[in-house]
Image: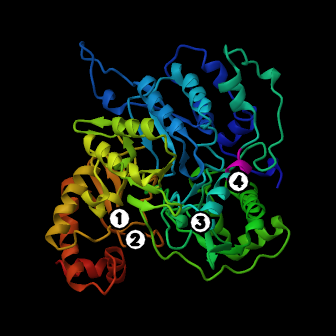
Amino acid sequence: MSTAEVKLSKLEHLKEGSHQLRGTIPEELLNDKPEFSGDAGQLLKHHGSYMQDDRDVRKEKNEDGTKKGKAYSCMVRTRIPGGRVTAEQFLAELDLCDKLGNGSVRITTRQGFQLHGVLKSNLRETIRAINDSMLTTFAACGDVNRNVMCCPAPYKNNPVHDEMQALSQELADHFKPKTTGYFDIWLSDEDGEKTNVADFNPVEEPIYGERYLPRKFKMAIAEPSDNCIDVYTQDLGLLAVVEDGKITGYNLLVGGGMGTTPSAAKTYPRIADKLTFVTPDQVIAVAEAIVKVQRDHGNREDRKIARLKYLIESWGLPKFKQKVEEYFGQALPEPHATDVTGVEDHIGWYEQGDGKLFLGINIESGRIKDDGDLRIKLGLRAILSKFGMETRLTALQSVILCDIDPADKEQINGLLAEHGIKNADELSLARRYAVACPAFPTCGLSITESERILPDVIDQLDVEMAKHGLASQKIAVHITGCPNGCGRPYTPDIGLVGKAVGKYTLFLGGNPEGTRLCFIYKDMVPLDEIVPTVSPLLGVYKSERNDGESFGDYCARIGKEGLEAKIA
């Protein structure tokens, strides 16, 4: 279809005329305004940054009674395939949050880092410093393939985990945009001199083309026994098929996605469909075919329905598969029978398989900061400075310390205790499997609180679970401040999605394994009524569950009306 036949949204025209994602970003970096223009802000996402403002400050007033207005800053996201971070890179990010951010680092649900509170005037210095540490913010956001997730468990002498991690890097490299705009703006333009677009020399974008993708695209890799990265919620999920301890190929899962707009019935969360089985040597080529089908046929008129899931829903899986085969150049087989069977959070001490240990440390909501007796930032800085181990970031917003000599275990436990950081056996499973998006005060889309209310919600839930004799039960709770789904709230046992200020839609019936969508149990639930609403359901679950049945499985089996009848 020619460009003339396609009705494009304003943002599509912006990308097409942006000189490969440059736009007016170079010029605007030189002015003294605290914010970027709207168009520049849209393009800025492809460089790994969002414009934000502190919504708490919006409410404050000056001495004369006038509103202070918006306190602008940038969120800066680092793209980290598979969550692999060296000690030096981790320490560099901690330094940056103190020097140029708001004093905290946030581990994202896609295994990346986020800095908040970076002033526009400090943005170039921040991005340069991240690149100096051999990480990048490029393509961490925007209408491209974003951070490639992978199970982070650092099992050594294990070809399955080694191969998955290697593939995450290969996919990240293959789908990285080719534009030199990122390098020109942030890394080579020392004095802000490259602002003349007349000097622009385009490069070929063989995968993305001149308009890049219609919407963001997400990939992730898992193995059946440990779907810690929620493979069914991705645009493209790769589920390893393992036979005799080796990966024989991957089931490709397509069309997952969490975002929805309640006022638009045309939008909805969706879990991926099983498309095909591919051998390891076919993965990159078939993945490219899938991305190109989305590039050429995804909706570029209406961004609300521009994700891959809507194309597949519109066409049907058979037609989509036929088109992927056309782009790939040969027929594709049916998926393998392999499917997800479990999930792990990787918190606590584990043997790596090479004589060393790894340690998973729970970071509530992923926020690395010092607050009273809990000094996560100081504790991690002390451990990483002393031992210098590799680290991995998890999709549950926590951190894994790798390659630990067993002789150092006692000393590391002492440092954790000294800084108020709890071990796995001091935390409930509900807390370990909980996820929250940032929401207030930095996210402009948030309707209500998420990260800041998670601790209290889990505190209350722990009390009720203990009361019902369920303290050792794995129940996953995901909270988001709006329906966009950044915390993947539509697949856990309990999902809470911001609907109005202080009120949430309560979803039930998913599972920690992330293989099933929740259903709406109750809408507009005030914050202080969430746990009292769930508690009676925990009671009937305890008395009526089948052997091995999770809370989400029970809720899915009984259904909304059945649950309501049991507590009426």
From the viewer's perspective, is 92 left or right of 29? left
Of marks 2 and 1, which one's residue comes earlier in the chain?
Answer: 1
Mark 3 residue element: loop
Q: Residue furthest right?
A: 329
| Location of residue 330 by image quarter | bottom right
Q: Residue at x 64, y 55 (%)?
A: 168
Circles 2 and 1: CB atoms closer than 8 Å: yes
Circles 4 and 3: CB atoms closer than 8 Å: no
Task: Give the residues in magenta.
Answer: 170-176
| Location of residue 474 by image quarter | bottom left
Q: Magenta stretch mostly in which secondary structure? A: helix
Circles 4 and 2: CB atoms closer than 8 Å: no
| Distance of label 4 from label 2 (alpha carbons) | 32 Å
Check residue 510 in the rendering and tell me which mark sits there, or answer none: 2
Mark 2 residue element: loop
| Distance of label 4 from label 3 (alpha carbons) | 18 Å
**Front position among marks 2 and 3:** 3
From the viewer's perspective, is 95 left or right of 425? right
| Distance of label 3 from label 1 (alpha carbons) | 28 Å
